[in-house]
């Protein structure tokens, strides 16, 4: 696992965007795995700027997001579909039909998850997966558990995640209790992974991910086993290393 310590959030975001831009230039029909949350917002801003400068072209790129809240409609401003439209998709020339996010309103969640995996497979697999990390070490919505085996699945959110994400909702009661998430198996199948973390609230999880044992109790620790994983963190998130 390569560890890159950036001086601040701005530098971290620029570095992540540069890696993604290089991927797209090298392979214009790249399949990107994308993440939501506060962490990648700066990366998306830089990608939009690179697009506007004519440096990258998204017309052949496909994207698969890690997760979506269950029971939340795509036009709900709290949905991850909405987040992606606002922070990236509406600012670039990606084709709407090339942006995939699990359907939070699926009746048959098992079928939705199975089809999501099939779509990733038909697209040729994920070339580059972007990740954040939760304070509890989750990646996607893969919460601490007792195994690493899962593909895309319906998850019960951890109380710590509900608390952390309540800042995006009017009150903690409104945070959905479940989500559809790519599994650890789906994430580990990506050819290359970049995980971003900033701020001191992530320092403990970052330390455990890099220096701790590989355990599903700290889901991000599995990335120690990935042959092409890079972690880009700011100095606050690196404080315990
Ligand atoms: P954040 O979330 O970027 O909003 O901190 C990261 C995560 O929970 O994976």
Image: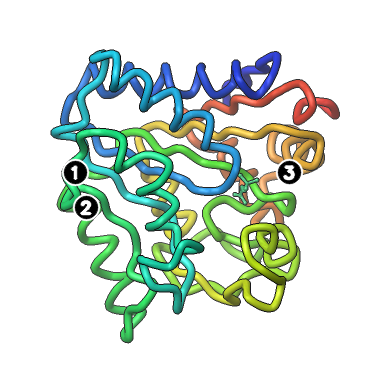
Q: CA distance from mark 1 to mark 3?
A: 32 Å
> In the shown orientation, is residue 50 left or right of residue 44?
left
Residue 5 found in image quarter: top right
Determine which residue is flagged by label 3. 213
Q: What is the x, y in percent for residue 105?
A: 36, 78
Of tags 1 and 3, which is closer to the observer? 1
Disc 3 residue crowd, few under 14, some 14–19, many 20+, Cα 10 Å: few
The residue labelled by disc 2 is: 121
Q: Earlier in the sequence, mark 2 or mark 3?
A: 2
Dot placed on the residue nearer the N-terminal end, 1 or 3: 1
Q: Position of residue 36 (x, y in %)?
A: 50, 48
Q: Residue at x 52, y 54 (%)?
A: 140
Task: Note whether 71 is above or below 182 in the view shown.
Answer: below
Measured Cα–Cα span from mark 2 to mark 1? 5 Å
Q: Which residue in the structure is indicated by mark 1? A: 124
Looking at the rendered structure, the number of numbered marks drawn on it comes to: 3
What residue is shown at x 62% (from left), y 18% (from top)? 4
Horizontal arrangement in the rendering, residue 205 relative to residue 138 (left or right): right
Answer whether labels 1 and 3 touch (C-beta < 8 Å): no
User: Which quarter shows the C terminus?
Assistant: top right
Q: Which numbered dot is residue 214? A: none
Is label 2 in a helix, a strand or a loop? Answer: helix
Q: Residue furthest right?
A: 240
């Amino acid at each position: 696992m390569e560890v890159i310590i950036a001086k601040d959030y701005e530098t971290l975001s620029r570095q992540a965007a540069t890696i993604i831009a290089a991927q797209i230039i090298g392979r214009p029909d790249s399949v990107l795995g994308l993440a939501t949350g506060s962490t990648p917002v700066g990366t998306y801003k830089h990608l939009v700027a690179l697009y506007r400068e004519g440096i990258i072209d998204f017309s052949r790129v496909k994207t698969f997001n890690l997760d979506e809240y269950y029971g939340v409609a795509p036009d709900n401003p709290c949905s991850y579909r909405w987040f992606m439209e606002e922070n990236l998709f509406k600012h670039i020339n990606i084709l709407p039909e090339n942006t995939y996010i699990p359907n939070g309103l699926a009746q048959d969640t098992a079928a939705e998850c199975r089809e999501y995996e099939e779509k990733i497979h038909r697209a040729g697999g994920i070339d580059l997966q972007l990740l954040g990390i939760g304070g509890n070490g989750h990646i996607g919505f893969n919460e601490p558990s007792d195994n690493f085996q899962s593909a895309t699945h319906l998850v019960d959110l951890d109380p710590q995640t509900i608390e952390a994400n309540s800042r995006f909702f009017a009150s903690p009661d409104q945070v959905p209790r479940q989500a559809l998430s790519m599994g650890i198996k789906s994430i580990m199948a990506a050819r290359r992974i970049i995980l971003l973390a900033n701020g001191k609230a992530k320092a403990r999880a970052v330390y455990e991910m890099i220096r701790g044992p590989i355990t599903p109790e700290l889901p991000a620790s599995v990335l120690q086993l990935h042959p092409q994983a890079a972690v880009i963190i700011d100095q606050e998130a690196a404080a315990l290393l």
